[in-house]
Image (spheres, rainbow, N blue to C red):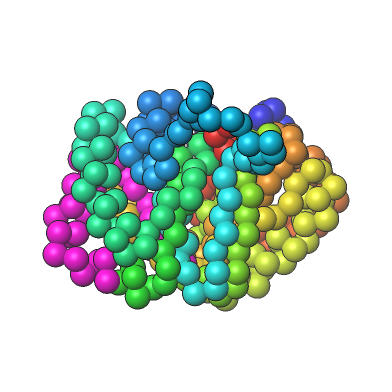
Amino acid sequence: MSEKSSQDLRLLCGIGAQPHQFNESPPMISFRKAPLLATVLLTSTFALTPTTQAQDNKPAPAKQEVPKPGFKVEMKRGEVLQVIASELRDDGQAAARKYGQTAFPIAQSFGFQRLGQLNVNRKVISDFDPEVFSFFSWPDQASVDAFAKHPDWPAIKATRPDAWSELKVYSVELQDDLKLQFDPSKHYTVLVAWLKTDEAIGDYNKYLEGIESAVERSGGRFIYKMRNPSMEAHASDPAAPHQLTFVEWETTDGFDKVQASQEYLDHRQYFGTSIERVEFYWLKAPS
């Protein structure tokens, strides 16, 4: 990101304000590649479907549909979506593997499914340093509650700090059907927003709606707004964010173009009046 873009991003967060806490001077923006080891570990720990190969003694089918790369989220109203952002400890691989081996079979018995993950390519604003945002589903809230009452779960959950410096679990019961396709050829951003007050959602919506045409003109589109999720975390402020906003981009300079638009200049004030703090990341679907 250019120096100008960094300055514009700080302006988006409020003049003379710290991006993640809007009452101090802004810190240096840092960028980090997601460690491959952590990504592989989390993928293998929660994978459901083994890879299979065609047998040599069987003829290949005449026509075979080639699966689309990336992953899908296809869920119905009433199901529960969980997005889990995780920062693996340097010495946490073994603990994470054990956690997955014990927690996942129990959760699966209540209908829990892993859908896929987005790797964090760049951390733009955050004190938290996750490697991945993973997507999971539950059949309904009753299934989530039943799993939470399983006698083995409290002891398993207590091991999270051994594996992850932080694990943020965002959950929401869907009010509408949801279909998403995450494509490795695209780029994604997520803005996790904590508002100053519940009433500030009006100004925040003015900001997002005001820049939408500029986003689309710059090769982006809003694909999902996770509103008022609950949050579990063992090393952070327990207050849940008001919204996670996912945007799909054709290129990584799309947001720079938005910041140069008149729509952004006309509406960035509403970001400043509504936002208490944010986390902002660039994400990528595994190929």
Q: Nearer the viewer, residue 164 or 60?
A: 60
- Residue shown at 71%/42% (left/top)? 249
Give the quarter of the image for residue 193. Answer: bottom right
> x%, y% of residue 91?
24, 29
- The image quarter containing residue 232 is bottom left
In percent of width and height, residue 247 lies at 66, 50
Residue 199 can be seen, yes or no: yes
Residue 236 % position (x, y): 33, 52
**On-image quarter of the N terminus:** top right
Identify which residue is drawn at 63% across, 59% down. 179
- Between 131 and 44, the one nearer to me in the picture: 44
Please, is residue 266 above or below residue 20 in the view? below
Percent of width and height locating residue 114: 43, 50
Q: In this picture, is 54 found above or below 169? A: above
Front residue of 27 and 143: 143
Q: Residue at x 49, y 43 (%)?
A: 117
Question: Taking 271 as reference, is 99 above or below it?
Answer: above
Q: Which residues are magenta?
A: 146-172
> How many labels were placed on the picture?
0
Does residue 160 belong to the magenta stretch? yes
Assess whether residue 163 is covered by the magenta stretch: yes
**Residue depicted at 15% across the width and 59% down the height:** 152
